[in-house]
Amino acid sequence: MLTITIAPFLVAILAPAICRFTPRACGWILALLPLGLVLYLASLAPTVWNGQTVVATTSWAPSLGLDLAFRLDGLGLLFALLITGIGVIVVFYSGGYLAGHRHLGRYYVALLMFLGSMLGVVLADNVILLFVFWELTSITSYLLIGFDHEREAARNGALQALLVTGTGGLALLAGLLMAAQITGTYQISGLLAGGDLLRDHPLYPAVLALILLGAFTKSAQFPFHFWLPNAMEAPTPASAYLHAATMVKAGVYLLARLTPALGGTDLWWWTVTLTGAVTMLAGAWLALRKTDLKQILAYSTISVLGILTLLLGIGDEAAWTAMAIYLVAHGLYKGALFLVAGAVDHEAGTRDITRLGGLRSSMPMTAIAALAAGVSMAGLPPMVGFIGKELVLEASMRQQGMITLTAAVAAAGALLFAAAGLAAVRPFFGAAGSPPKDPHEAPLTLWLGPLLLAGSGLLLGLAPGWMNAAAASAAGAIAGSPSPPVKLALFHGFNTALLLSLLTAAAGTALYLGCARLRKLAMPQWGPAGWYDAALDGVMSLAAAQTRILQNGYLRYYLLTMIAATVGLTGYAIARLTALPLGANLGDVQFHEVVLVIVILVSVAVAVRSPSSVTAVAALGVVGLGMALIFVLFGAPDLAMTQVVVDILTVVLLVLVLHSLPQVSRPTKPGPRFRDASVASSAGLLIGLLVLGTAAIEHPADSARYFIENSLPLAGGRNVVNVILADFRVLDTLGEVTVIAVAAVGVFALRRLRERPGEKS
Amino acid sequence: MILLLAIVVGSLYAGGLYMIMRRVLIKLIIGLALLAHASNLLIFTASGLIRGRAALVPAGGSLDFRQVADPLPQALALTAIVIGFGVLAFALALVQRTYQVVGSDDLDQIRSTDT
């Protein structure tokens, strides 16, 4: 199973080459990949539907508990078949839709990588692996939405989708890690088995909130729904695939997958069901107010995602079965309608339904596909959408005392019915519109896909028994235990659900006819999209403000910040010590040493305080000579000699350069001067304490012993310091010589640089 | 004696840090030089002080490593002194050049590379 997840990534790498080689046929060639995956998954299907799971584990980083663990059960298989099946159609459709596009290869890279990531999400059996694939779908989605990157709207839509789903992804990671810590396993199947542990844990609400945040942002649940309509900037086949059929359902998948671990509590029921219900109604209502085909479809997708979430919130066998069937139904009809919208846009040059009409005569094949898919979306027989809607209504009615829930589902059904009319009927019937292009039938690649999808919807509607095993095993996987067999039928007899269906159809027809009036209704202009903008602006101004403060361009403030922070933090650590670990034996002091120290201290003071640079340089020279004397006194003649030479050279250089610099002093104000002085003094005090602290440490003399004992026998030298420099640690010396050489070249270059014209001299 | 040297090291650091926070370029250089001294002396002092006995192996004899100054920190400090000088020389050339190009030795007026 590792292979089928990796395969799309490998093919993605080859895609640009294939597209360059045969730009016309590459869609068909690349579609072979998802086709192969469908066949492979189908070959596994009987095993899975018999209640077994297929497991494949490859060790990745075992020390971190990280395995490439994959697990195929009824739920995963349902999603995987949807992903690969619709993938086949989207891949070859894209070849026709983007025919001749400069970056077709690039598009396929992102699309196929998305396919692989999505498969990874639904097959992964390790929380980290799941998260990695989850984020990969966000990233590939970003690339696909922003594919047309020369338009600002596409870039903004892509960024918005990435930020919203990415933030949710981070919350998800935190939630998954907490869950893994609580249950003690990173394996998802193990995590599900430890559900009781998780639900009884005091942190359960936090885990649930974080994971729901991840799922809700991904599946565009209210109030995070706003990114989905903006993601419609993607090329239409990508919208059909990512933002209708697959990616947005990753959140639904996650909820379903984690139901055995997190579900079944009151908190779950209320949060998930309510969020789903609000999303369902808001999405369907907003869909009717749009005139752009893709926008109508996007909002109706939000509504359907709300329905699926609501079903998972309800969380019983009936709801899970309804979820599985409605998922398939929606994937088929919404994929088809998006592809139809793409074909219409391609051939008529607009997606505005107020400018479209009567296309059925010029685009008959597309019209058939649209109509069939639209019937499914409206929830009318004999399509699979009808079965799905009936099941949803029945599941909502099984909730005791929740008549409002049923009413809400029915209302959403009516609104979706009207939206189906807008998206599938309006452009093809009635009087001819005024599109910018003279419409004619789309090429085969553009109508075959939607027709196949809509046809599948019809087939599954007429023979719903084919889905029995799939629905039962998916519901069983969500439940975490084998579920009773499911018997699906197109006609359930005359019952309340059918009556409600008739009511919603009637109400939907009324809404469809009145939708022009609906669009004129005033709506409040605030909403979550505004909150997103405000949050983004807030982050931007925060960044600008902190840059202004921290990156102010004054060297001394940078230094001041660094020194003060170091002193503060170290000082805090020292203040927490009960006793300073100072050396007890500070040693005896001799008179000449005291004199020497006083000379050095006075010279430092002069070097710092003197208004004249020349005096300061002279004082610096005295400091250097004082250092040399200290070295002499404490057994370091080599250091002393070097110090004297360097000191003389330094003073000479300084004096030479001083000549060419102005002799003006710029006294700072007393306030800042006092501030700098106190920060510098505290740093000095700290380091002084550090030196005293080192006296308390017993020096392990191993290195000294080694060098002293081996200096003569190994290196043949009596001056141990010299031997270390020239023999034992000669690489250090080589480095030192290199530094000096580089500095010399640098100095030479700076001196010899010619003035460029226009420069001040 | 270590108490006195601790005072010296602390004062060198304090003076050096104060100087590199000034506006005038040449003070920055003096600050750097003071910091170089401070660091060398810090390494030297921290390794333990032994008066007067250098790590020199006498002819025909051997040396007790407990009786003489540790040679390794000395070697490190020697390298540091030389490198410190290299840095100082380069910084000085840079300062001179900067003044030629920008026409100011005031750090507040040298705030971008595009001056």
Image: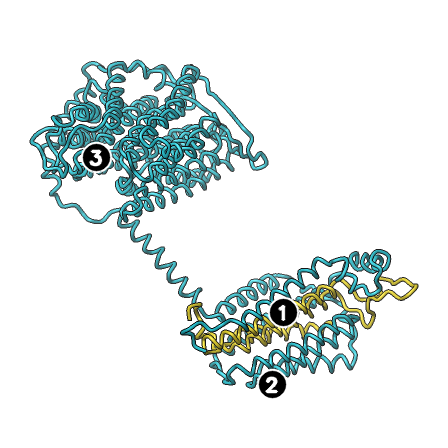
Chain colours: A cyan, B yellow
Do the residues at discs 1 and 3 belong to one chain?
no
Estimate the x, y position of residue A754 in percent, counting from the top left: 49, 72
Residue wearing tag 2: A615
Tell me which amino acid carries mark 2: Thr
Q: Mark 1 sits on what residue?
A: B86
Quarter of the rendering containing residue A240: top left
Residue A104 x %, y %: 33, 36
User: Cβ–Cβ below 8 Å for labels 3 and 2?
Assistant: no
Graded by Cα atoms within 10 Å as few (under 14), some (14 to 19) or many (20 or more), the crowding at tag 1 reads: many
Please, which chain is the residue tagged with disc 2 on? A
Nearest to the observer: residue A754 or residue A570 = A754
Q: Which residue is mark 3?
A: A346
Residue A156, numbered label? none
Camera-side mark, 2 or 1 = 1
Q: Is residue A295 left or right of residue A272?
A: left
Percent from the top left, x then y, of residue A46? 41, 14
Asked whether the viewer can see residue A314, the reply is: no
Q: Which sits earlier in the primary sequence, circle 3 or circle 2?
A: 3
User: In which quarter of the view is residue A339 placed?
Assistant: top left
Q: Amino acid at mark 3?
A: His
Residue at image point 85% right, 58% down: A709
Left or right relative to A559: residue A161? left
